[in-house]
Image: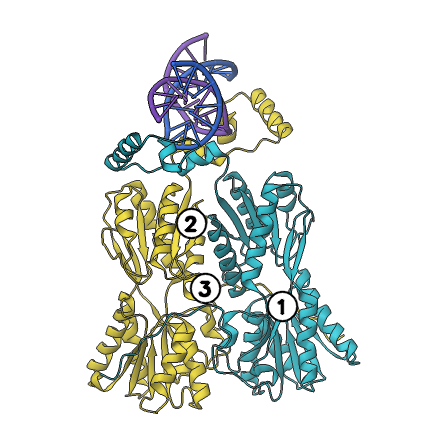
Chain colours: A yellow, B cyan, C blue, D purple
Amino acid sequence: MSYVLNGGPRGVAPETRARVLAAIEQLGYRPNGIARSLRMNRTMTLGLVVPDTSNPFFAQLSRAIEEAAFAQDYTLLIGNAAEDDERQTTYVRTFLARQVDGLFLVPAHGPASCVPELQRSAVPWVTLDRQSPGGGAPAVLADNRNGARAATEHLLGHGRRSIACISGPEDVVPANERVGGWRDALAEAGVRPSEMSVWHGTFGRRAGYLGGRALLADGRFDAVFVASDEQALGVLRALQELGIRCPEDVAIASFDGIAATAYSTPALTTMAQPFGQLGQTAVARLLDRMDDPDADPHISVLPVTLVARGSCGCPDPPGGDAPAETEPAETAEGAQ
Amino acid sequence: MSYVLNGGPRGVAPETRARVLAAIEQLGYRPNGIARSLRMNRTMTLGLVVPDTSNPFFAQLSRAIEEAAFAQDYTLLIGNAAEDDERQTTYVRTFLARQVDGLFLVPAHGPASCVPELQRSAVPWVTLDRQSPGGGAPAVLADNRNGARAATEHLLGHGRRSIACISGPEDVVPANERVGGWRDALAEAGVRPSEMSVWHGTFGRRAGYLGGRALLADGRFDAVFVASDEQALGVLRALQELGIRCPEDVAIASFDGIAATAYSTPALTTMAQPFGQLGQTAVARLLDRMDDPDADPHISVLPVTLVARGSCGCPDPPGGDAPAETEPAETAEGAQ
DNA sequence: TTGTACGCGTTATCAC
DNA sequence: GTGATAACGCGTACAA
């Protein structure tokens, strides 16, 4: 019976197979995955804990992971830490108790008190977007520093010299790496970063909006590097309210490459993260570790690519260029 | 041992309890949730299958469900159907095999061939956003028709008379209900809807962009009701490219109330769905059915509320009004 | 080729 | 108040 469903370790006579299948049909039998998991010691389930599901960047990242996991027949348990350390720990604990075969963690900013717990457990895990606070686990990240540098260099290439920086929380490593890249570019161009200003906030739209109003109102700057697209969208709105034109008065370049950047006005110039590749790499690294727990905890740094659009001063392409997803065909219904 | 951890059905002597706790500590014992689930016949896990995770509306809806489920100690298994019927069925099957205690389904457009399967299974389920194609299950929805009508009436109130409609796929019920509400409002105002045009596409930004270009280029319309915020954001971009001003030349009102609407330029006037309430109601209905599988498959229709902003011609409030989430405080770092 | 029995880690019942 | 044990449903080793 197990043998017929699973093409089991051994064969089964055609006549018996038919009899079994008939019984299955008649009884409406459904295999119980829980019992199977208990016996096999594998759940075919992976956990994913994210700082904030409502942030489109994490949403797009989650989707990429889901896609890669699905392709390998794994299902995803998703937890939303809501930027709360306690809640993050709760989810990690819950997932471990549920015997996930592996875990992805995008650490929320703050203490990450769940890391020791993870290390004690035998469950393989991988950090995403940010390096493991405690170390010891593989990580899959974007090349934050060089990306930020390239974005800033692009603004410099447009002749901008007073370039501000709006970034994420001060205790988040990638936020600071992006600030570092911005400094690198300015230093190399001989612009003194000390004349500039950095603003720190959360990674949401609202933070960008507030940062924009705080930093760009007085006309000191002719450009701004923003550490995330979400924030940049908020900056765009702030500029509009202040009557400052983008890109004429203030040019913008940002980071992440989320889908929404292709439809704003002007469309955002951004350093696009390779979402698909991030997801695939993360899953691959996790499977590596599941095979061999002592495998090298490799840190994968993936390159980001400049997508030049209107916000930096480049020609603004039609809406929806460089589509992240394939789009089904549309149907138009004429006048009635 | 089980008794000391669970405060089990019966008491345990203090001395024994201490001994057990010591052993737990020493052996690094972790309870196995899978074995527990097998024994208890409950996994404390709910499934959620969504048509398209990358659509911010579904992302926000998922988050609301996750929130409500978390509050009841349930964990969520999330599946992305990617608007593909086969994939939707695969996820439903997988979740049933994993013995989820209940399932939320936001049916993708199309055949929904997983419904018979769900009905055959004994697992309680609830449809969201759209009614169950096969019936028999509770549903939690927004008041699409009246909401669309209110939005259109608001545009009429601004003196607009030539109001187009951009909607979702023709085989999606809520899309058509919203078209229905638009027609209702026009009919009541004595405007002949036959002079108008309806455009159908998918629920994404790109579809709105294409619809906007197709319908609004020639100046026939002075307003448009758009069936989803995502599409409306695309319309906004299309108008900009066409050199048409919003709201002066064409006013916009849309539907859903996603967070992004508060930061576009102009900010979007929209019929906001009560996400938190939708999530709580959905979870409550599911728990009802888990208690009593024969409970009435109630259809909950929740009201939507008009959020008036700049796109319809109302005064445009500062960015980020009516915030959907509470935002942590920001920190500003002065000039360096 | 097929039937049978064991064990995965829990919880709950039973006899002590 | 406690210790032993059956059962959840599956996969598989072993005996037939």
Q: Quadrant of residue B116?
A: top right
Mark 1 to mark 3 CA distance (whole Å): 20 Å
For the question of whether residue A59 can be seen, the reply is: yes
Do labels 3 and 2 touch, CB within 8 Å? no
Chain ID, mark 3: A
For the question of whether residue B32 can be seen, the reply is: no
Residue plotted at (27% across, 41% down): A292
Residue nearer the viewer, A265 or B262? B262
Q: Which residue is mark 1?
A: B304
User: Which quarter shows the N terminus of chain B?
Assistant: top left
Classify mark 1: helix, strand or loop: loop
Q: Tell me the tag on residue A54.
A: 3
Q: Is residue B86 found left or right of A313 in the rendered image?
A: right
Residue plotted at (38% across, 34% down): A41
- Name the amino acid, label 1: Val
Classify mark 3: helix, strand or loop: loop
- Does label 2 lie on the same chain as label 3? yes
Q: Tell me the tag on residue A69.
A: 2
**Label 2 crowding class (10 Å Cα cut-off): few <14, some 14-19, many 20+?**
many
Do labels 1 and 3 touch, CB within 8 Å? no
Q: Position of residue A335 (x, y in %)?
A: 74, 76
**Label 1 crowding class (10 Å Cα cut-off): few <14, some 14-19, many 20+?**
many
Q: Position of residue B22 (x, y in %)?
A: 25, 35
Q: Position of residue A17 (x, y in %)?
A: 56, 24
Q: Tell me the tag on residue B260.
A: none
- Name the amino acid, label 3: Ser
